[in-house]
Amino acid sequence: MSQLIMLDDNNTIFPPANLALSEPNGLLAIGGDLTTERLISAYKQGIFPWYNDDDPILWWSPDPRCVFFTDQFYTSKSFKKFLKKSPFKITLNQQFKQVIAHCTLPREKQDGTWINTNMMQAYNQLHQEGVAHSIEVWHNETLVGGLYGLFINNVFCGESMFSLEANASKQALYTLCQFLSAHGVKMIDSQVENDHLLSLGAQSIPRVDFLNHLKSSSTSNISIDWSSRELCHD
C-alpha cells in the first residue's frame, strides 16, 4: 500500500513514481523546495509540482498520463482554414516572463491558477538555465497567447498556456508540435487530461509507458536550437 512520502530538505532524491497514491491520483511526495536541481531531478523522473498557495509543495505523477504525440495534433477543417489566414506571428523564447505572468491570471469561472510567486521565480530561473522555454503568439505587436514548459530528456513537459484571442494558444501548441516533430521529438507531456487537451489530439497513456519513453528518449541524439526567433508553420 502506497503512502505519502515526506521529502528531505537536504537532498533532491525522489521516491519512484510508481509509488504515487491512486487517490488523489498521482500524489507522490510532500515538501522540499523548488530549486533548479530538485525540479530537474523531478521532471527527469516524470514528477512535477502542483499545489495551492496555502499548501506545502506537493509532487505528482498521475496514472494515466496525458500526452501529445507531436505528429498527431488534431487539426480540424476550421482550424486548417484559420491557419491559412492567421493574423498571428509565432516566436520562440522572446518573452518567457510575460508568458508565465499571463498564465498566472484568473481564467473564466476560476479565481486564479496554481502558479504562485515561488513557482514563477523557479521557472524563470529554469529559463535562464536554458531548460524552460516559451512560445509566444503575437497579433501585430501585442502578446495574445502562448505557452511554456521544460525540455527534459528530449521530452517537452508542458506547464501552462493562455489565450487572449480565439485560436491563439491552439496555434502556439500546433506550432510547437511541428517544431519538435521536425527535430525528432515525439512527445509533449501534458500531465493531466482535460476536455480541451483531448479535443486537440492529446491522449492518456499508462504512466509506465510514459516513464519508459522518458527514459528511452534521454539517449536519443537530438539537438535543438532554442535561440529566440520567429517560428514558421506549414
Image: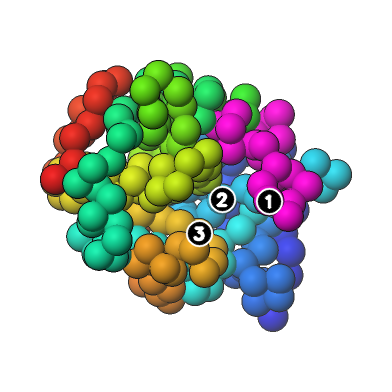
* Residue 145: percent from left, percent from top: 46, 37
Pointer 3 residue: 191
Looking at the picture, which amino acid does disc 2 mark? Phe
Query: Quick check: 74 left or right of 234?
Result: right
Task: Give the camera-side residue of 111 and 11.
Answer: 111
What colour scheme does the image use? Answer: rainbow
Q: Is residue 107 magenta?
A: yes
Residue for point 78% across, 47% down: 111
Pointer 1 residue: 108
Q: Which residues are magenta?
A: 100-119
* Residue 184: percent from left, percent from top: 15, 49
Q: Residues within 10 Å of mark 1 (few under 14, many from 20)?
A: few
Q: Nearer the N terminus, badge 1 or badge 3?
A: 1
Cα distance in 3D space between marks 2 and 3: 8 Å
Residue with the most extreme right position: 54
Q: Quadrant of the N terminus?
A: bottom right
> What number is the disc on residue 48?
2
Looking at the picture, which amino acid does disc 1 mark? Glu
Residue for point 23% across, 56% down: 80
Q: Secondary structure at mark 3?
A: strand
Cα distance in 3D space between marks 1 and 3: 21 Å
* Residue 104: percent from left, percent from top: 65, 37
Give the number of the mark in front: 1 or 3. 1
Q: Nearer the N terminus, badge 2 or badge 3?
A: 2
Residue for point 58% across, 32% down: 102
Query: Quick check: 106 left or right of 126?
Result: right
Looking at the picture, which amino acid does disc 3 mark? Gln
Residue 228 vertical position relative to residue 32 in the rendered view, above or below: above
Q: Secondary structure at mark 2?
A: strand
